[in-house]
Amino acid sequence: MNKPYQAIPDIEVLPAHFPIPGAGFLPVNAFVIKAKEPVLVDTGMGIESEEFMKALGLVIDPQDLRWVWLTHDDADHIGSIHKVLEAAPKARLVANSLAVLRMSTAWPIPMDRVYWLNSGDSINVGDRNLTAVRPPLFDNPTTIGIYDNKSEAFFSADCFGAIIPSPVQNIDDVTEGDLAQGMISWASADSPWLHMVEPKVFGQALDKIREIDPKMILSAHLPPAQGKTEHFLEWLAKVPTSTPFVTPNQTALEQMLTQG
Ligand SMILES: [Fe+2]
Ligand SMILES: [Fe+2]
């Protein structure tokens, strides 16, 4: 985990960077929305759960949390969910019903604390509405991003992620070329189905984000990005016709192991 920081005054980032050998670092962010009813968005990676809970405690007393919103049930988003629910007894668990069903195969979920949302549904958290929005790219069918109508930020889950050369807090510290390449590769690797989609059809999904016109993109896998939405949409539009990302194979693993 890295030190928490503010994206904007009422949104805190709980950042981590997962090293990807030979490629760089994948940012892994959770967020705290300091709404009237405070919200934690995702719960980091299990491998650094202790550090995650410490970082969370620096930003808010977990007892004050009223909502824990899981954008989906992938391991890098639910790493501390048990500890968080224990430390935040007043918080409801917000997720897509399928995410709750899938997680129920691993641990007993307190169903009386659960709140189910589909894309298009909203919750009111006192000073703002948070609306579930399925991002144009996702690696898990339970994915719901969040549009926050007060900050006008879009919490985009895995969408708009990028592997970046080194950990940074400020997205402007990544060159535009590295960022574009990182985002296009990540999109191809994380949502390989995109190569089966007609570019025009995918363009319509991108247009839905254009219509929302978020001021800020808060991806789980990118530093906070203000005023860059159109750029990002243009980059993603190139992915269906780009060369598909190929994951490293056994030869690559053996090379890595001998290089130590
Ligand atoms: Fe994911
Ligand atoms: Fe993820």
Image (tube, rainbow, N blue to C red):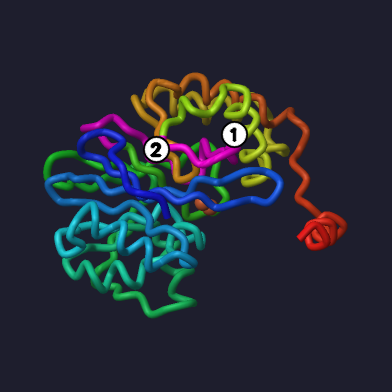
> Is 162 inside the magenta-drawn segment?
yes
- Total labels: the figure holds 2
* The C terminus - image quarter: bottom right
**What's under tag 1, amino acid-wise?**
Met
Quarter of the figure with residue 147: top left
Q: Residue at x 29, y 75 (%)?
A: 110
Dot 1 alpha-carbon crowd within 10 angstroms: few under 14, some 14 to 19, many 20 or more: many
How far from the left and from the top, in percent, is residue 52? 36, 61
Q: Residue at x 48, y 19 (%)?
A: 230
Dot 2 alpha-carbon crowd within 10 angstroms: few under 14, some 14 to 19, many 20 or more: many
Q: Residue at x 23, y 48 (%)?
A: 123
Quick check: 221 above or below 229? Answer: below
Q: Circle 2 sits on which residue?
A: 218
Residue at mark 1 to residue at mark 2: CA–CA distance = 14 Å
Decide if residue 35 is on the left or right side of residue 148. Answer: left
Magenta segment boundaries in residue numbering = 148-169
How far from the left and from the top, in percent, is residue 102? 48, 69
